[in-house]
Image (cartoon, rainbow, N blue to C red):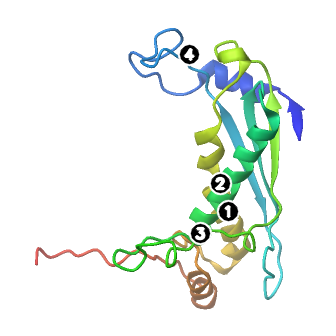
């Protein structure tokens, strides 16, 4: 879907983030102009016991893209970023010596992915090439947090405030049954040995 822009892109242009010395309009190291992007991600929870596979209600991302020069490609990039966020939040875990290849390292497959929605917000960016903005990073960054927040919202009434990413089924189950936070990180060693 495409929508007209409002305050989202105006906010990005007005304060778009920290300034880096030597970077900025007409002064970037790569010769390109700075055009900050903004994104908002949404994942809605659905209470159900036991939860069905693909129980998410159409995760979505609204991305301020400036002008979408190739709208289908921009939407596909955004949808891929949502799926990447799902993988980071729910299944991708690197374990040295155990997940050295894609056979052992879990990533989302077509059976894991719910329907996703990308909403392109278009408002010409005067500093971007042909009015466009970059979307790669901003489409990716908010996804994992949106998925984790949806799960924590669903189990938070049990007193659980944190389950470390990835939210593997056994970690979430342990959090629900013990009604306590679950950390997937190994214990921190305090001695020098």
- The residue that mark 1 highlights is 147
Single out the mark in the foreground, 1 or 3: 3
Q: Earlier in the sequence, mark 1 or mark 3?
A: 3
x 82%, y 42%: residue? 119
Residue that carries the numbered disc 3 in the rendered image: 107
Q: In this picture, is 91 found above or below 172?
A: above
| Disc on the earlier residue, 3 or 4 | 4
* Tag 4 and tag 2, C-beta contact below 8 Å: no
Q: Position of residue 181 (x, y in %)?
A: 53, 77
The N terminus is located in which quarter?
top right
| Left or right: 84, with 100 as reference point | right
Q: Estimate the x, y position of residue 79 in percent, counting from the top left.
A: 74, 51
Distance between mark 2 and mark 1 Cα atoms: 6 Å
Q: In which quarter of the image is residue 122?
A: top right
Query: Rounded to the nearest whole Å, what is the CA distance between mark 3 and mark 4?
Result: 35 Å
- Is label 1 in a helix, a strand or a loop? helix
Q: In this view, does 59 lie above or below 181?
A: above
Disc assigned to residue 138: none
Q: Do the residues labelled 2 and 1 touch (CB within 8 Å)?
A: yes
Q: Distance between the residues labelled 4 and 2?
A: 26 Å
Q: How crowded is mark 4: few (under 14 residues within 10 Å), some or many (20 or more)?
A: some
Q: Which of marks 4 and 2 is nearer the N terminus?
A: 4
> Which quarter of the image is occupied by the C terminus?
bottom left
Q: Earlier in the sequence, mark 2 or mark 3?
A: 3
Mark closest to the chain's N terminus, 1 or 4: 4
Q: Name the residue under label 4.
A: 33
Q: Where is residue 100? Give x, y as percent.
A: 40, 73
Mark 2 crowdedness (10 Å alpha carbons): few <14, some 14-19, many ≥20: many
**Badge 3: residue crowd in 10 Å (few <14, some 14–19, many ≥20):** some
Please tell me whether mark 4 sits on a helix, a strand or a loop.
loop
């Amino acid at each position: 879907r495409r929508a007209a822009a409002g305050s989202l892109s105006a906010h990005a242009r007005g304060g778009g983030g920290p300034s880096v010395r030597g970077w900025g309009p007409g002064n970037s190291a790569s010769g390109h102009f700075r055009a900050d992007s903004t994104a908002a991600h949404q994942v809605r929870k659905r209470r159900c016991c036991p939860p069905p596979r693909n129980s998410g209600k159409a995760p979505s991302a609204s991305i301020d893209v400036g002008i979408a020069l190739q709208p289908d490609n921009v939407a596909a990039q955004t949808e891929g970023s949502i799926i990447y966020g799902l993988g980071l939040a729910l299944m991708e875990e690197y374990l040295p010596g155990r997940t050295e290849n894609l056979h052992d390292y879990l990533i989302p497959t077509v059976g894991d992915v719910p329907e996703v929605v990308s909403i392109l917000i278009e408002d010409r960016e005067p500093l971007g090439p042909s009015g466009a903005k970059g979307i790669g990073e901003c489409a990716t960054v908010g996804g994992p947090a949106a998925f984790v927040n949806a799960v924590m919202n669903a189990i938070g009434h049990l007193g659980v405030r944190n389950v470390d990413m990835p939210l593997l089924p056994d970690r979430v189950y342990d959090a629900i049954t013990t009604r306590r936070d679950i950390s997937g990180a190994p214990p921190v060693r305090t001695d020098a040995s």
